[in-house]
Amino acid sequence: MNYSICIETFFPKLGFDERIYRLIELGFQRIEFWDHRDKDIDAIASLVKAGKVEISTFSGHRKGDLFSKTGFEEYLQEIDASIEAAKKLKAPSLMILSQGLQPDGRALPIGLDTRLKEEDLQARLKFNLQKLATIAEKAEITMLLEPLNSKIDHPGIFLDSSSMAFELVKEIKSPHLKVLYDIYHMQIMEGNIIGTLQKNISLIGYIHIADVPGRHEPGTGELNYGNILRAIRSAGYNGTVGFELFPSKESKEVLEGIRDAFLTGL
């Protein structure tokens, strides 16, 4: 497995370029982030070209939705811009959601009659995901569909179920569409983490980790990440595990702990 650090939440007082250099100094080569528009993409691309850092993934959109006509048009505009950034950064994948998020984490409204049945919304979701899979194939990139928790962090998000995400990916049958399984979100929504991962490992293109509660580093909450990571390794997962979390202590101390516990193997 590969490990990646989300630079959004570490060294918050530093600029993004300086954060990357700090991660490199600590021994991390793979990074990920959220919105590409507040980053100096050309500067990061220079680091990629020099072999200093690799971009594992970043958010494919921050607006729009996969349900309404106008929402999907906005979504596609976001995806087009993100694909261009991904080409510069040699990023192999983009993270996507059922709809965009507001600054406080709440999901953006989808702009449709709320009386629509869930199966109708799911049908629209599948139809537009099929279009995205085609776009991804042409761009030679992977779309990572991520269900989020709607109980704490992202009220109003439609896709808050891993079973729905797995079913959609199975039905669409595209190697360019995979599930991003975020253990933090799915522990809150469903639990049964190891069993779900083992059962669906072939449908998973990326894994995010953080402990519950608090969304801090492993070892601060209820999840046994040693057992979880050994289980997915045994199941044959050879993709990326991303640390998308809010450090409970100083960034350097938390990153050193992650490096010593995970980069040296479990």
Image (tube, rainbow, N blue to C red):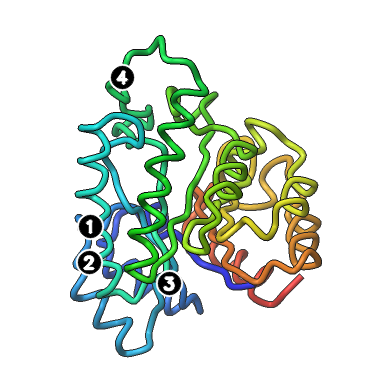
Of 30 and 79, the residue lying toward us: 79
Q: Amino acid at mark 2?
A: Glu
Q: CA distance from mark 2 to mark 3?
A: 25 Å
Q: Answer with the quarter of the image where residue 163 lies.
A: top right
Q: Which mark is residue 67?
A: none
Q: Is residue 56 above or below residue 157?
A: below
Q: Residues within 10 Å of mark 4 (few under 14, many from 20)?
A: few
Q: According to the image, label 4 marks what residue? A: 112
Asked if labels 1 and 2 touch by Cβ distance under 8 angstroms, the answer is: yes
Asked if labels 3 and 4 touch by Cβ distance under 8 angstroms, the answer is: no
Q: CA distance from mark 1 to mark 4?
A: 24 Å
Q: Which mark is residue 23?
A: 3
Please tell me whether mark 1 sits on a helix, a strand or a loop. Answer: helix
Q: Amino acid at mark 3?
A: Leu
Q: Answer with the quarter of the image where residue 151 lies.
A: top right
Q: Position of residue 262 (x, y in %)?
A: 66, 69
Q: Amino acid at mark 1?
A: Asp
